[in-house]
Amino acid sequence: MKVSRLTLREIRMDLLTPFETSMGVSTSRRVVLAQVEADGVSGWGEVVAGEDPHFSYETVETAWHVIRDFIWPALKSREWNAAADLWDALAHIRGHNMAKAGVETALWDAEARLKKMPLWKVLGGVRQENSCGVSIGIKKSIDELHLAVDKELLAGYQRIKIKIRPGWDLKPVEALRTKHPSIKLSVDANCAYTLDDAPLFKQLDRFYLMMAEQPLGWNDMYGHAELQKRVETPICLDELITSVPGARLAAEIGAGKIINLKLGRVGGHTVVKRIQSLCATKDIPNWCGGMLETGIGRAHNIALSTLPNFTLPGDVSASKRYWAEDIIEPEVTVTPQGTIKVPHGPGIGFEPKLGLIEKLTARKEVLA
Ligand code: MG
């Protein structure tokens, strides 16, 4: 493949309902889309960097800069046998995984379209239907939380995850467990606690959660290993895992029993494939986390969730939970059984709605 053009667009979209985590409240998103043109086809990727450097150090602005000034010169410089070759060719750029993933996933989409194959098959996926869970933000009251959870259970979702933070942890978990003794329930702290809070996580053990996600700091490998020794609840790592060596270290020292994988956090499909292969040898199941993606990022998440070691329900859910109108067609829908059927069209299997994307575009740069 020879990439002749890379179009960057920043689009702005309002979330249907505000989403609150321990990092703050999101009401709208600025999203960078990458469109690569290679040998007559377009491949699409999404940069999941936030408006602020809260989830990671990357932002919309750093991603734009790194893609334009560093990734694009590398991308245009040669022919690509496969999208799988891009990750190692970008090794001279340290970090900036979200910027890299936006472009890398677009190249994977282009490769699959050129092969006239669904992306999930090109990636090596093994299932045609993915189990879905939902992530529910911090609510103003327990009543409001019950309403939100009841709605998602009724829609069929197989696992409920709630965001927690100090002051919103034991009580909501206890309330949900009392009302729903048998649902798959988990919590996500987004780094809001320290090892001094180990007694709190010990108390959570009695609610037999599926997992407690990223309780401690984004770079606290030792702390997570120490916490996992003290609690029964499996710890799931999110923010902490940004590379293959990081995943290997976490597995070796027992920093968690589950790893959530996100394309943007680790740098794209190639690294996700490597980490999930590694995790399979260590008995660490994976699942796909969400970053409030538009349909483009969501479609890539559906494809990667078909990889063999993605054995737990992910956070990939229906477009209509987030957006009045998604930027792909058809929109992502969830069956009454709480699954997403994997598409069979070429590439990501969904078509970007170009007219809508243009309408939402606040900034555009064509690199050629
Ligand atoms: Mg998380």
Image: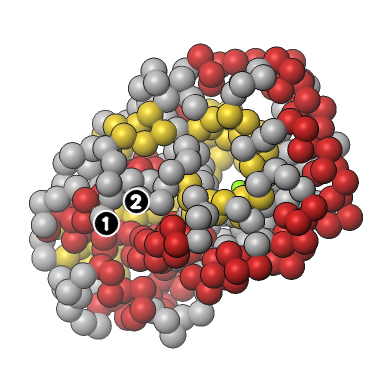
Q: Quadrant of residue 124?
A: bottom left
Camera-nearest residue between 73 and 264 = 264
From where the camera sits, is residue 75 visible?
Answer: yes
Quick check: 39 above or below 338?
below
Relative placement, left or right, of 73 versus 258 is left
N-term mark: 2 or 1: 1
Per the model, the C-alpha gap separating discs 2 and 1 is 8 Å
From where the camera sits, is residue 56 visible?
Answer: no
Identity of the amino acid at label 2? Answer: Leu
> Can you identify the residue that label 1 sits on?
123
Q: State the mark number for residue 307.
A: 2
Which quarter shows the C terminus? Answer: bottom left
How does the figure colour the protein chain or chains?
secondary structure
Q: Dot 2: within a 10 Å radius of its alpha carbon, few (fewer than 14), some, or many (20 or more) residues? A: many
Q: Position of residue 252 (x, y in %)?
A: 60, 69
Q: Position of residue 364 (x, y in %)?
A: 37, 58
- How many labels, in total? 2
Quick check: 10 above or below 294?
below
The residue that appears at 59% across and 23% down in the rendered structure is: 183
The residue that appears at 25% across and 83% down in the rendered structure is: 77
Q: Position of residue 350 (x, y in %)?
A: 25, 40
The residue that appears at 26% across and 37% down in the rendered structure is: 128
The residue that appears at 26% across and 63% down in the rendered structure is: 107
Are the residues at dot 2 and dot 1 in contact (C-beta closer than 8 Å)? yes
Identity of the amino acid at label 1? Answer: Leu
Q: Secondary structure at mark 2?
A: loop
Relative placement, left or right, of 114 versus 70 is left
Relative placement, left or right, of 235 versus 244 is right
